[in-house]
Every structure is written in structure tokens, then in C-alpha cells.
Amino acid sequence: MKVRDISSYLDKAVPVSFQESYDNCGLQVGDPENDINAAIISLDVTEDVMDEAIAIGCGLIITHHPLIFFPLKKLTGNTHIERILLKAVKNEIAIYSSHTNLDILNAGVSRKMADKLNLQNIKVLSPLKNRLYKLVIYIPESHFEKVREAIFEAGAGVIGNYDKCSFSQAGTGSFRGGENTTPYAGEKGKFHLEKEIRFETIMPSHLKDQVIMALLASHPYEEVAYDIYSLENEYNAAGLGCVGELPEPLGEKDFLFFLSDIFKAEGVRYSKLSGKKIKKVALCGGAGISLLGDSIKAGADVFVTSDIKYHDFFNAGNRILLVDTGHHESEKYSTEILYDLIIKKFPTFAIRFSETNTNPINYL
């Protein structure tokens, strides 16, 4: 197994294009062509995690939080990041991170939190915007089904829980091939009319290249006529946070104890209790206070996230219970997402969870 086998797979399974503009996801350290026999998964890369990887012979560390987040001006070993990087290079250990792209993935960090709480009717809390395209293609009738199915197989045509969504309309196309052409229909140098079908469907931006490749490979024309339009529709299949419902309503304190137990949170902080039952739950792993308004708009009884500042608790008012589980606690299960993705694709590859507790926060 080479580093690039896993890194290339994760780049697509957790689309790097989903990451926020400030982020730094993907392969951060290491030669993609290096051979590896094993990998270790951790929420963070710390010096202890690096030492653990060295000790057990892992050639790849996969994390949620990126090691290189801000630009580096020196590499002298004066900081823990620099020391980790020097050890990684010296021991030929690659480092790969899926950060905000794993947050935004529909089956990502917040969804994992919701699954741990057994929530039902789960939806994305803040869907992605400006990530959808309308694809319009003109296909000769003889190849319509072949091209349509190839485009669907490449991932286009998905709207919510429906797939193979499209619109088609029959019409007539015209063209004249030049002297250096080999037309699929008609003769070069002669004006030709061909019965065609205008086919329209939708595709997310991160699948554009593979959809177009499938289109071109299945279409019989030398020069394929197609159009791509940017859409303002929300992409409900991905985004930050999620919202769902508990199987049965819980009292506020019962919910807080339940939450603390599931995420092993030793210092849950929360806003003023109102005495209302908790049924609808909004969640965002990591620092998600920016989604407070979305949670209220969604009608949630509680919003669970982390890194909440003092004055943010005032903003919750009596409209919603605001809960801070701790950053590490809210994202700790992200390692399970990455593990499951890799094992599904590479079932015989040796991959393990780090035994190092990387939480930098302790509670008295």
C-alpha cells in the first residue's frame, strides 16, 4: 500500500473541496509514493501520538485536526508542531487530515454525534450554498439511455433522498463537420440535422470532473455539446451541523446527564434551564456557535456545540438551551468515521486507533 492510495481515496470520500477557505486538509506531510504497512487514527497529532506511531511502525497518521494550520516560517524544533514535523520527516511518517471537510460531510462529525444520541429524522442544519450545477447535454436518441446512465452512475441527479433525477425533451440538433472530422452521423463538409434529446440534471461541484469524464466517455460525438450553469439552490446533502429528534422527550437535566455520559464530558456547561422538555436537538461538532441562529430557526429545544464564550450564553436567552460539551468531546468520534471509510475500501489494511489521549484540557 502506498500513501497516495489512502490519501487519494480520502480526498474523494471526504471531498477536499468541501473544506472552508481558511482550512488545510489533505496530505500535509510525506511522500505520496512511500510504501506503508499500517496507519494510526487520532483526533490530533501530538508528540505522544507521533512517538506511538514510530513505536508500532505506522507509516501514516490520519487525523481530524490538521497539524499545519498556520504558515510556518521556521523548522528548528522550537515548537511542538516543529518537533512533530521533524520526527515525521526523519521517520518517513506521513500525516493526513480531514478537518472542516469532515465537518461538512453529511455523514460527518455532527451526524456521528446525532447517531450516538440515537436521534431520528436527521437533517443538515446549515446546508452548503453555491455548490450545485445544472448540467445540460444534447444526446442523439440512439445513445440517450447509455449517456444518461453513465452520468447518473458518476453521481449526478441526486436531490435529497431521490436519485436519477432529470428532465429530457426531444428536439433537432444541427452541425457541419470540417475536413478533419469523423462525424458520428452525417458527412463531413455537409450540413446535418440529427434527432437529439436535451437532457438536464443536477450535480454537486465536487463531482463535476468525474461526471464530465463519464459524459465524454459515453457520448458518441467527437465534439460534445453541453452547458454547465451555477445554481443558487442549497445543497442539502452536505453542510455544517445537523438537527434531529430524540426517540422520547427528556427533561433538561436528564438530557444533560445523557449527553455527558455519551461523550464522556467531564465539564458540560449550559445556559439557564427553562423547565421545558428536550425533543428536537441541534448539534455541531467543534466550535459551532455561529449556528445558534440556525438552531433556533430550526425549532430546536437545545443546541449542543463547544468553545462557547461567556456572552454567547446570554444570546441563547429563553429561546433555546445552549450546551458546551467541550471541543475534544464533541469531535472524539470523528476517528470512527475515518476508520469505517478506510476499512470499507481497504478491508485488509492494518489500521488502528491511537491509544493516546490528545485532549489538552483537564478538569478539577
Image (cartoon, rainbow, N blue to C red):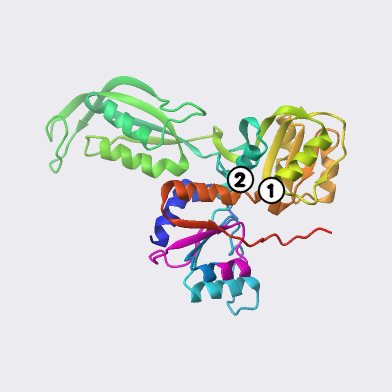
The x and y percentages for residue 10 are 47, 51
**Within the magenta stretch, is there residue 32?**
yes
At label 2, the amino acid type is Val
- Give the answer, above or below, for where 85 lies relative to 8: below
Which quadrant of the structure image shows residue 279? top right
Q: Which residue is drawn at 70% across and 36% down?
A: 282
Label 1: state its secondary structure: helix
Residue at the image point whose x is 80% and y is 51% from the top: 267
Residue holding disc 1: 330
The stretch of residues the image draws in magenta is 24-52
Residue 38 in magenta stretch: yes
**Residue 299 figure quarter:** top right
Q: Given contact means CB atoms under 8 Å apart, are the residues at marks 2 and 1 in contact?
A: yes
Give how far across and how far down residue 284 sits, in percent: 67, 43
Residue 337 horizontal/vertical position (percent): 55, 47
| Residue annotated with mark 2 | 109
